[in-house]
Image (cartoon, rainbow, N blue to C red):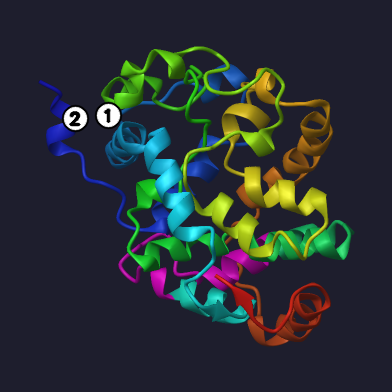
Amino acid sequence: MRGTEEVAQPLQSLEEWDDFVASRYQPGKSQEEFRHYSAEANPGVAEFYRQNHAHQTLDFVLAKRAEYLPLKRGKKSIWEAAEYLNTLVDSSDPDTDLSQIEHLLQTSEAIRRDGHPRWFVLAGFVHDLGKVLCLYGEPQWAVVGDTFPVGCAWSDQIVFPEYFDANPDGQVAEYQTPNGIYEPRCGLDKVYLSWGHDEYIYHVTRNYLPEPAQYMLRYHSFYPAHKHGAYRNLMNEHDERMFEWARKFNPYDLYSKSAERPSLKELRPYYEDLVAEYFPAQLDW
């Protein structure tokens, strides 16, 4: 009997997830320290990954791509999407009362302070907008969390790899080799990653942003690859070069959270101009 399964409660808010990720990837830790995950210490996170790893199958990913990537859920502006996402704020969370827009501004303002290009700043501002999937009725395990390829063997660099024992793809021999259904070094654009907000916001914005920003958005949760070097057998030389941008983006996403609230009133004119520079007034979602 799995005792933690009986007492564990799934995550209650996206803020709880963000706090966990930020604490997990603290500056100064060695890679070895990243692999020590405790179901007892983080039962809600463990339950999240138990569900994520059991249900993120190749068939599930293909079904979600077919459901969402035609972008038929209506038109919204970037600002409308950000304000829509604000309804996810959990007022009962004792650790933070920042809105989603404020979190996005913290990330993008940290990038801006370091003098990066405007498209880089914009990537910081929009990177989590794909979490509107939660408001479409998707469970958190199908929206957030570290992403990983499906249709091939799971890396032991994925958090809680033992939970894949419940995934039915483990019974499909073709999916349990390093390359699985893919050709070696085929390139990540031909690889299906577990479904979540990264892939969704990449498709919503892909026609408007330069390629380095596309990599930031599409792979910012692909920690097994950009943090631990897994799945290089599926990456081509172009992926290797572009992943340097994903690695540059990652610290801003992880370490920009603070108690200091950015002033939306003061910053909005800058971001309205920035959004209008790259995006049309309405995008397909």
- Residue matched to label 2: 4
SS of the residue at dot 1?
A: loop
Q: Is residue 229 visible?
A: no
The answer to whether marks 2 and 1 mark residues whose Cβ atoms lie closer than 8 Å is yes
Image point (39%, 13%), residue name = 173
Nearer to us of marks 2 and 1 is: 2
As displayed, is residue 215 above or below residue 181?
A: below
Which one is nearer the viewer's eye here, 260 or 2? 2
Q: Residue 223 in the image: x percent, y percent? A: 59, 33
As displayed, is residue 232 above or below residue 212?
A: above
Which one is nearer the viewer's eye here, 114 or 235? 235
- Residue matched to label 1: 40
**Looking at the rendered structure, which numbered label has been put on residue 125?**
none
> Amino acid type of disc 1?
Glu
Let me know if residue 90 is in the magenta part. Answer: yes
Image point (47%, 72%), residue name = 73
Q: Residue 163 in the image: x percent, y percent? A: 32, 24
Which one is nearer the viewer's eye here, 157 or 282? 282
Q: Residue 81 in the image: x percent, y percent? A: 54, 75
Asked whether, in this view, residue 173 is left or right of residue 150, the answer is left
